[in-house]
Amino acid sequence: MCGHESPCPAAMSPDRERAEVLGRDSLLGWALLCNGVIVFDDTGCLLATGQIIAPHRPALAGAPS
C-alpha cells in the first residue's frame, strides 16, 4: 500500500488515478501508480485484480457522436 504522507487513493476508489506515479514507459504508453494500478495513455486502466477499466476520455465539444 501507499507510504506517502497523505495516502494515495486505493485502487478500487473512483479517484484511483490521482495516486503517485512510480514508473512510466512513454514509448509503450503506460504508467504504474503506487496503488498498483496501470494507467494507459488512452485513459484505460488495469487493476492488480486483473479488472479492466475501459478508456474514459471526456467527449469533445462539437465532436460527432
Image: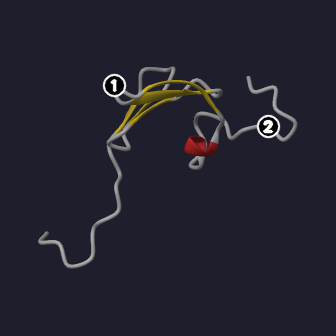
Q: Which mark is residue 52?
A: none
Residue 28: image quadrant is top left
Secondary element type, mark 2: loop
Question: Horizontal and vertical percent for residue 27?
Answer: 34, 25
Identify which residue is drawn at 68% across, 41% down.
9
Query: Which quarter of the figure has residue 62?
Result: bottom left
Q: In this view, does 64 lie to the left or right of 30?
A: left
Q: How is the image coloured?
A: secondary structure
Residue behind mark 2: 7
| Amino acid at circle 1 | Leu
Quarter holding residue 53: top left
> What residue is at 75 percent from the left and 27 percent from the top?
2
Q: Name the residue under label 1.
A: 27
Residue nearest the observer in this picture, 5 or 54: 5
Q: Where is residue 8 in the image (x, y as percent from the top left)?
A: 72, 38
Q: Residue furthest right?
A: 5
- Find the residue positioned furthest to the left: 64
**Lateral position of residue 19 relative to residue 45, left or right:** right
Residue at 65% of width from left, 27% of height from top?
Answer: 34
Quarter of the figure that contains the N terminus: top right
Label 1, residues with CA under 10 Å away: few <14, some 14-19, many ≥20: few
Single out the residue that lies furthest toward the bottom: 62
User: For this view, does 60 lie left or right of residue 56?
Assistant: left
* 29 with respect to 61 (left or right): right
Q: Distance between the residues labelled 2 and 1?
A: 29 Å
Q: In which quarter of the image is the C terminus?
A: bottom left
* CB-based contact (under 8 Å), mark 2 and mark 1: no
Q: Is residue 31 above or below residue 6?
A: above
Q: Residue at x 27, y 69 (%)?
A: 60
Of 50 and 20, nearer the camera is: 20
Look at label 2 and name its amino acid. Pro
Question: Which of the two discs, 2 and 1, labels the residue nearer the N terminus?
Answer: 2
